[in-house]
Image (cartoon, rainbow, N blue to C red):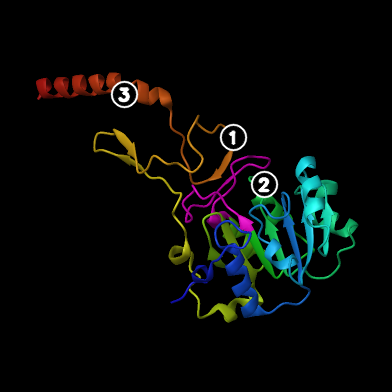
């Protein structure tokens, strides 16, 4: 069975999102031709919407970094785009819905792209009044897709695909595609239009950046790869919600001591038999 990722191609996107988005709208059609993206960077950098608003679409582009925002204004000046300098929050005066309301956006959004390296899950979860027909949301590609895991809000950790699926389903969305770093959702009313595509998570997940922690029968460990997507520094100290455990470096350093204690206990047991 074909997958939407079979249509991946890059014009401005990073992992073929341009081609997938194009195929999705070939399938469900367009209505408003309005796309919204944040963080938008300079408009073109690894963008999921630039291939749309450089054609016949209207874009609303949101970027909180002042330096990037200035480049954004310059880069899109010849296109039908509105730019907002703000960091989107999940509550308060800077929610996506509040920002769009101030901008006078009233029509239904055809495509919403969420890419802010951390709070993506919470922004998706915060949507109450707007119902984009298609949502592209970033996930942490180092988390196995089938694990439901998300960091507490205001983090630089992100979430898994499964966490996004849970939120999406609660809001009436169906997962239809996954790239290395993005999950694609359509409103449930369009689900039947993708009957000819494989959309089951276990079949469409992308494990390119997943690293396995492998142990011997006595607990010595190795990693399945050395080229970690984001490197490795220190244990994550923030709050995590979902399936996970934390590794104590003390237990690793003291392993020789534990081995001696275990051997001593085994010796005593043998002597007492």
Residue 214 x/y as whole percent: 32, 41
Q: Measure how far apart labels 2 and 1 are at the Cα level.
A: 14 Å
Please state which of the two labelled residues, at mark 2 or mark 1, is closer to the viewer. Answer: 2
Decide: few, some or many residues near mark 2? Use Cα within 10 Å; few <14, some 14-19, many ≥20: many
Residue 213 x/y as whole percent: 37, 41
Q: Measure how far apart labels 2 and 3 are at the Cα level.
A: 37 Å
Mark yes or no: residue 131 visible.
no
Query: Which residue does the numbered mark 3 point to in the structure image?
Result: 255
Mark 3 or 1 closer to N-term?
1
Query: Which residue does the numbered mark 1 point to in the structure image?
Result: 238
Magenta-highlighted residues = 137-163
Decide: few, some or many residues near mark 1? Use Cα within 10 Å; few <14, some 14-19, many ≥20: few
Quadrant for the N terminus in the image = bottom left
Which SS does the magenta portion mostly show? Answer: loop
Mark 2 or 1 closer to N-term?
2
Query: Which residue does the numbered mark 2 point to in the structure image?
Result: 119
**Horizontal placement of 249 versus 133: left or right?**
left
The residue at the point 42 percent across, 25 percent down is 249
């Amino acid at each position: 069975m074909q997958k939407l990722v079979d249509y991946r191609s890059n014009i401005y996107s990073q992992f073929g999102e341009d081609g997938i988005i194009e195929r999705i709208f070939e399938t469900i059609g367009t209505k408003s031709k309005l796309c919204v993206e944040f963080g938008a960077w300079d408009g073109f950098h690894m963008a999921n919407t630039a291939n749309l608003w450089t054609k016949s679409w209207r874009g609303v582009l949101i970027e909180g970094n002042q330096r990037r925002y200035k480049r954004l204004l310059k880069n899109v000046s010849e296109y039908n785009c509105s730019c907002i300098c703000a960091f989107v929050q999940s509550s308060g005066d800077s929610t996506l819905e509040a920002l769009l309301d101030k901008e006078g956006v009233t029509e239904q959004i055809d495509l919403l792209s969420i890419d802010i390296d951390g709070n993506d899950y919470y922004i998706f979860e915060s949507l109450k009044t707007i119902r984009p027909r298609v949502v592209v949301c970033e996930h942490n590609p180092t988390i196995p897709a089938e694990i439901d895991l998300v960091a507490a809000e205001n983090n630089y950790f992100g979430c898994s695909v499964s966490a996004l699926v849970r939120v999406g389903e609660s809001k009436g969305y169906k997962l239809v595609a996954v790239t290395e770093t993005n999950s694609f959702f359509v409103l449930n009313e369009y689900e039947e239009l993708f009957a000819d595509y494989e959309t089951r998570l276990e079949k469409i997940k992308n494990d390119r950046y997943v690293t396995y922690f492998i142990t011997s029968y006595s607990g010595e460990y190795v990693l399945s790869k050395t080229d970690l997507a984001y490197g490795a520094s220190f244990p994550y100290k923030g709050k995590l919600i979902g399936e996970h455990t934390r590794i104590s470096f003390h237990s690793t350093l003291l392993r020789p001591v534990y081995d001696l204690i275990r051997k001593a206990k085994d010796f005593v047991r043998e002597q007492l038999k």
